[in-house]
Image (cartoon, helix red, strand yellow):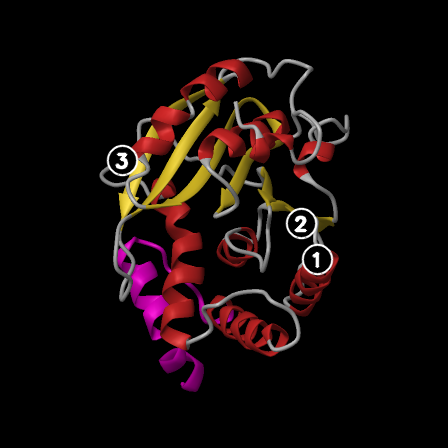
């Protein structure tokens, strides 16, 4: 009963989006939140730790991608079918404290998740949370996305690649599309309508083989401002010269 009251914002928000969380999943989110608050006292994970804000800004925001996986009257919210197919291979670039990747893994335990985080202390936290929640199939890679994008084990290796709050879209495109398989999707979580970012990223998208195919706008309970998911499909191969050396995509975006 206690944890249901604590996680009420999460449960009600998810239900409004057609996402039903089991009692086990709600408890996993509660444990995740407790670990986040405890570890945040030792390492800088997030500035948002107040319970209601964390449920909305961290957990619900992460789960917003599942809105696109909810069929309504036989049709999906967008015309491309489900983004997260059963057991799809998904990467979270710049995973930080695990949003959105680990939150999505709780809601969709079938996902094969790879968390990419270059900061060792944050990677230790991610490993702790994944282990404490009983996820044996979560891979955590302590590496920069630019290096991973040139590694044959990971390049073109993911059905869906996610990034939330890492960099501007024109830079993110170079970090994420090399990891995305052709025909797969790169999804950027953005605050605001993000129209300017989309316009600025057209050159990068063209060079790297991506095409914006959907923009999903939504609001979060108790949070001001709009949020948007930018769904980019990889329609052609990324040239071998990308990504450039670590640091260059953000310092000199295409």
Residue on which disc 2 sits: 117
Can residue 7 be seen at all in this image of the molecule?
no
CB within 8 Å, label 2 to label 1: yes
Q: Position of residue 179 (x, y in %)?
A: 63, 30
Q: Is 191 on the left-hand or right-hand side of 239?
A: left
Q: Is residue 254 above or below residue 114?
A: above
Compute the Cα span from label 2 to label 1: 6 Å
Residue on which disc 1 sits: 123
Compute the Cα span from label 2 to label 3: 38 Å
CB within 8 Å, label 2 to label 3: no
Q: Nearer the viewer, mark 1 or mark 3?
A: 1
Magenta segment: does it hold 17? Answer: yes
Residue projecting furthest to the right: 152
Q: Is residue 177 above or below residue 167?
A: above
Magenta segment: does it hold 179? Answer: no
Label 1 CA crowd tier, 10 Å (few <14, some 14–19, many 20+): many
Along the line of sight, the residue nearer the viewer: 124 or 4: 124
Along the line of sight, the residue nearer the viewer: 235 or 201: 201
Residue projecting furthest to the left: 73
Residue on which disc 3 sits: 74
Residue range corresponding to the magenta coloring: 1-24
Compute the Cα span from label 1 to label 3: 40 Å
Res. 239 image quadrant: top right
For the stretch drawn in magenta, the main secondary structure is helix
Q: Nearer the viewer, mark 2 or mark 3?
A: 2
Q: Position of residue 131 (x, y in %)?
A: 70, 65
């Amino acid at each position: 009963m206690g944890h249901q009251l604590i996680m009420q914002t999460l449960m009600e928000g998810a239900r409004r989006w057609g996402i039903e969380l089991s009692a086990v999943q709600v408890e996993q989110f509660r444990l995740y939140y407790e670990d986040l608050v405890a570890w945040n006292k030792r390492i800088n994970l997030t500035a948002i730790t107040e319970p209601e804000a964390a449920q909305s800004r961290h957990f619900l925001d992460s789960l917003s991608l599942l809105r696109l996986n909810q069929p309504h009257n036989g049709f999906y919210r967008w015309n491309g079918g489900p983004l997260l197919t059963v057991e799809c291979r998904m990467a979270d670039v710049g995973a930080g404290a695990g949003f959105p990747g680990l939150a999505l893994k709780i809601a969709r335990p079938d996902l094969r998740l790879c968390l990419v985080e270059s900061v060792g202390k944050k990677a230790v936290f991610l490993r702790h949370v994944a282990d404490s929640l009983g996820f044996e199939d979560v891979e955590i890679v302590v590496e920069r996305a630019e290096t991973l994008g040139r590694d044959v084990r990971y390049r073109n290796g993911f059905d869906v690649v996610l990034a939330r709050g890492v960099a501007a879209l024109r830079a993110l495109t170079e970090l994420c599309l090399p990891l995305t398989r052709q025909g797969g999707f790169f999804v950027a979580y953005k605050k605001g309508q993000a129209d300017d970012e989309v316009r600025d990223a057209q050159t990068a998208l063209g060079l790297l083989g991506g095409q914006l195919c959907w923009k999903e706008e939504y609001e979060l309970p108790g949070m001001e401002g709009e949020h948007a998911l930018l769904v980019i499909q990889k329609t052609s191969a990324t040239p071998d010269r990308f990504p450039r050396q670590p640091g260059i995509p953000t310092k000199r975006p295409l």
